[in-house]
Image: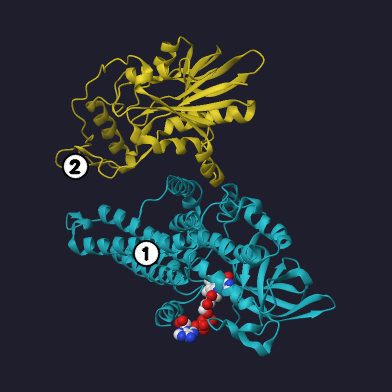
Chain colours: A yellow, B cyan
Amino acid sequence: MLNIITCFKWVIDEADIKADAATRKLLFGRAGYKISAYDRHAIEEAVRFQEQHGASVAAVTVAPPSAKKCLKDALSRGPDSACFVNDPSFLDLDPSQTSSILAAAVRGRIKFDLIICGEGSDDLYAQQVGPALAERLGIPCATCVSKLTYAEDEKHIIAERRLDDGMETVLVPLPALVSVLPGINTPRIPTLKEVLGAAKKEIFNVALEELGDIPGPYLKTVEVVAAAMDRRGIRFSADEEGVRSAVNALFKEGVLSQGVL
Amino acid sequence: MNFQLTEEHQLIRAGVREFCGKFVDPVANEIDQEPRFPSEIVKKLAEQDWLGIPYPAQYGGAGSDYLSYIIVVEELSRSCATTGFTLECHTSLASYPIFKFGTEEQKQKYLVPLCKGDMLGAFALTEAGAGTDAGAATTVAVLDDGEWALNGSKIFISNAPVAGMTIVFAMTDKTKGTKGLSAFIVPAGSPGLKIGRHLNKMGIRGSLTAEVLLQDCRIPKDSLLGQEGQGFRIAMMTLDGGRIGIAAQAVGIAQAALDESIRYAKERVQFGKPIASLQAIQWMIADMATEVEASRFLTYHAAWCCDQDLSYSKEAAMAKLFASETASRQTNRAIQIHGGIGYIKEQKVERLYRDAKITEIYEGTSEVMRMLIAGSLLR
Ligand SMILES: Cc1cc2nc3c(=O)[nH]c(=O)nc-3n(C[C@H](O)[C@H](O)[C@H](O)COP(=O)(O)OP(=O)(O)OC[C@H]3O[C@@H](n4cnc5c(N)ncnc54)[C@H](O)[C@@H]3O)c2cc1C
């Protein structure tokens, strides 16, 4: 039976973020949290494997203790157990730290053949935690995976990768890590019984002291402000002349270049 | 005292919101306009374990509490009042009497498929001459040759055309008034059972509302629900719980009116700025939000009383009274905030305005709610 780890991040629900009109500062006052949407696909893919091949699935997250609520949310989506790697200092971690913490938490503690991550997180979308975790664990990694199959007899997976310049199909021996794209599946909406059943599943807590040395951050956030979109207020008519001037305007702005045409 | 929903309740709400965004919102307008019964959505409700929320797992239910059920009705109604009400009628009006008064055999035969969504249920109390005055029912049931024979007709029966079974109230002893009323389980396809006219409604237009005609309708002897003469009590207890469901439906409609109003007020520009910057609009929005929140608390409190095994009849009446009148007021204000466009079909607020009104009428009118509340205070 396969042992699968699926990693997920508890992020601020972007729908709740407001921006101050004058300073463009982000206001998080009443913002709720949710499982990063990409990671819901990772969890779903793990659960699909569980249903099709009889795998055991552990959902792992690194977060401050205040994020405890995320565990039932994750467990209601199908994993058998959750591993909560938590410390009050686990706030605004950069990807190198998160991957170190995950590696330290997983190594020797959770058995795995396959680790499934989301391609990136809803908040940072750095796309680094997956590959960095694989590197630290010394296992192969396939990113941008849009289809995953398991060759049960041969102990490898076949991953279809959606890349900028085409599709690539790779055969990866297990143990391995994949990071998945949203197109890979449609995450289920947990049924009521699944929601109620989440409370009965096993949760492992892992504390900072159990992890050994965790490196400091490489990144320093200087400022976060809301993106402002300035409109030029130029109108184009729908006739030939209008289309021509719209195209010219795009050239002038550098949106289009001669090379593209 | 704790005003916070449990993690489970929050997850349930998030799940229904996601469900609605995916499956209900895209078709809610069409359900109202055609109108059509949303059978494909009802099937999905079953897959989510939402058709038997407060009933135990041994009867096919989800084994959850009443508050979970109320949250689901609220959120479904926020997207589509027809869908919210269909679930409410099925769960509160049709399933509850069997859960509370049915024999083990009746529960296995009917409650299990009802909870699993293998059949929908209906509840037939009202008659042309017996609405608020349910004791004036003229439908009769007599034992004949080892079977019950039912004769009479019911009106305004929700879900009847799609129901696998209907709880029918009929007089077994006319001389006793309300004490002569009994409840029966009438399976679809029973000889002599006919679905009459479908009624063309102002709101919840996708919900099926029809006459139920009983012409020497024959059902087995063991179809009696509870005791002979217990029908009025069964009906009243069923409606007590149902009213919390209707209150939740009203809260959902009122919340949707508020959602739409906030969105529109920020978008609509007049005199060079969004109308949301006008105090006249701000005050309406503030009042709407406050009344919606008050309705929600009354409704959740009634559901909580029910979950705590406390008496909840007065609480349910208060919740239904306040939430239903709130829904009518807020949908009216929402149209006012929208101006002319709010009066045009295919605008959600136009539908909400029509959907809200029924919550003041069915499962006991506002007048009846006031009578019940006063009655319990002045006893
Ligand atoms: C869409 C829809 C769905 C329905 N679904 C169902 C269903 O599934 N099953 C079912 O059995 N019924 C159903 N009903 C019936 C509904 O419950 C009744 O319409 C309601 O109880 C009111 O009865 P009535 O229409 O006969 O009004 P009436 O009883 O005639 O009332 C008319 C007016 O008089 C007032 N009034 C009556 N008596 C008193 C009194 N004693 N004191 C003060 N005021 C009083 C009422 O409040 C109301 O304002 C449905 C109705 C509708 C419109």
* Quarter of the view holding residue B286: bottom left
In the displayed structure image, the side of residue A46 where residue A225 appears, left or right: left
Residues A141 and A197: in front is: A197
Residues B360 and B333: in front is: B360
Residue type at mark 1 is Ser
* Residue B164: image location, x then y, percent: 69, 62
* Quarter of the view holding residue B296: bottom left
Residues A230 and B2: in front is: B2
Q: Does the residue labelled 2 lie within 8 Å of ligand 1?
A: no
Disc 1: CA contacts within 10 A as few (<14), some (14-19) or many (>=20): many
Q: Name the residue under label 2.
A: A20
User: Can you say which quadrant of the picture contains the C terminus of chain B?
Assistant: bottom left
Q: Dot 1 lies on which element?
A: helix
| Label 2: chain letter | A
* Residue B256: image location, x then y, percent: 38, 58
Residue positioned 83% across, 75% down in the render: B146
Q: Name the residue under label 1.
A: B295
- Judge whether residue A261 can be spotted in this image: no
Residues A169 and A113: in front is: A113
Residue positioned 65% across, 88% down in the render: B176
Q: Dot 2 lies on which element?
A: loop
| Label 1: chain letter | B
Q: Same subunit under labels 1 and 2?
A: no
Callouts 1 and 2 close, C-beta under 8 Å = no
Residue type at mark 2 is Asp
